[in-house]
Image (tube, rainbow, N blue to C red):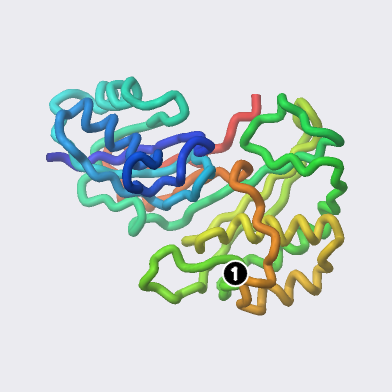
Amino acid sequence: MKRYAATLAYNGAAYFGFQRQPEPTPTIQRAVESAIARVTGSLSSIVAAGRTDTGVHALGQVIAFDADWRHSEQEFLCAVNANLPADIALQQLWRQDDFHPRYDALWRQYVYRIMTPPVRNPLIPPQVWQLLGQTLNLTRMRQAAALCVGEMDFAAFGTPPQADSANTVRHISVSEWESAPGDYGEVLTYRVRGTAFLYHMVRRMVGAMVQVGTEKVTLEEFETILNSRDIERAKLLAPPEGLVLEAVRYQQKDYDAVKAETPELALDWA
């Protein structure tokens, strides 16, 4: 058996999150493990850099698994992709001994996208939260995002993903909003990078920042919520469709000669 690592992209709309659940619940993990089993003839349990929630997408998810494969990595990638549904696909695959995508990660990066058309537009990509007829104050949202940079207790925005953990302190190094024109209007993109994230943390942060942008919550009230450690105060949970796990970063030394470093991946809006 050899250890393989891979980057994985998926549209999570049809799945109940990444983590395997009892049949017949569809999950990303179950779909990928089933595809690998069909190719190799044996079961392989995959581990991931992060467990995305129901309906959440990924462009740069990183996974690892052990498998017995006698051909090239590129042939392995093509064979697994041929057995995956259309909404899941390996992007890269390589041999990587002694690699754990979760414990070896330096940081994870998510993006969340919002558009504010006057009425629902069916041609806007489904990986976007359509806030119909809203006007958002981007300056205030950027100010709120800046308050989230640093190491602090984010208990107001999420809960520990592990049931046996009570640690809600996380370090955020990037928290910023960008605006860019799209084919169907302005696209607001929130990008957040951290060592790790709490359950629902990014979606609650986005929800609270949107309330700042609509001026339902002041910047001072946002800061009070952030410091309160009270999850009941972050009332708006942004929907999952706008959230994408964009990239995971590792030390270059963690990779062999076949793969130097996980690239910075960005969603193509072409």
User: At which x and y percent is residue 7?
Assistant: 39, 38
Does the rendering let one see residue 16? Answer: yes
Q: Is residue 3 above or below residue 173?
A: above
Image side of residue 126 versus residue 248, left or right: right
Q: Quadrant of the N terminus?
A: top left
Tag 1: amino acid: Gly
Looking at this view, is 213 or 130 the one in front? Answer: 130
Does the rendering let one see residue 253? Answer: no
Image side of residue 21 versus residue 198, left or right: left
Q: Is residue 216 above or below residue 133?
A: below
**Which quadrant of the figure has residue 153?**
bottom right
Image side of residue 43 versus residue 16, left or right: left
Q: Quadrant of the C terminus?
A: top right
Q: Secondary structure at mark 1?
A: strand
Image side of residue 266 versus residue 8, left or right: right
Which residue is located at x 53 percent, y 43 percent?
A: 55
Which residue is located at x 80 percent, y 36 percent?
A: 186
Tag 1: Cα neighbours inside 10 Å, few (<14), some, or many (≥20)?
some
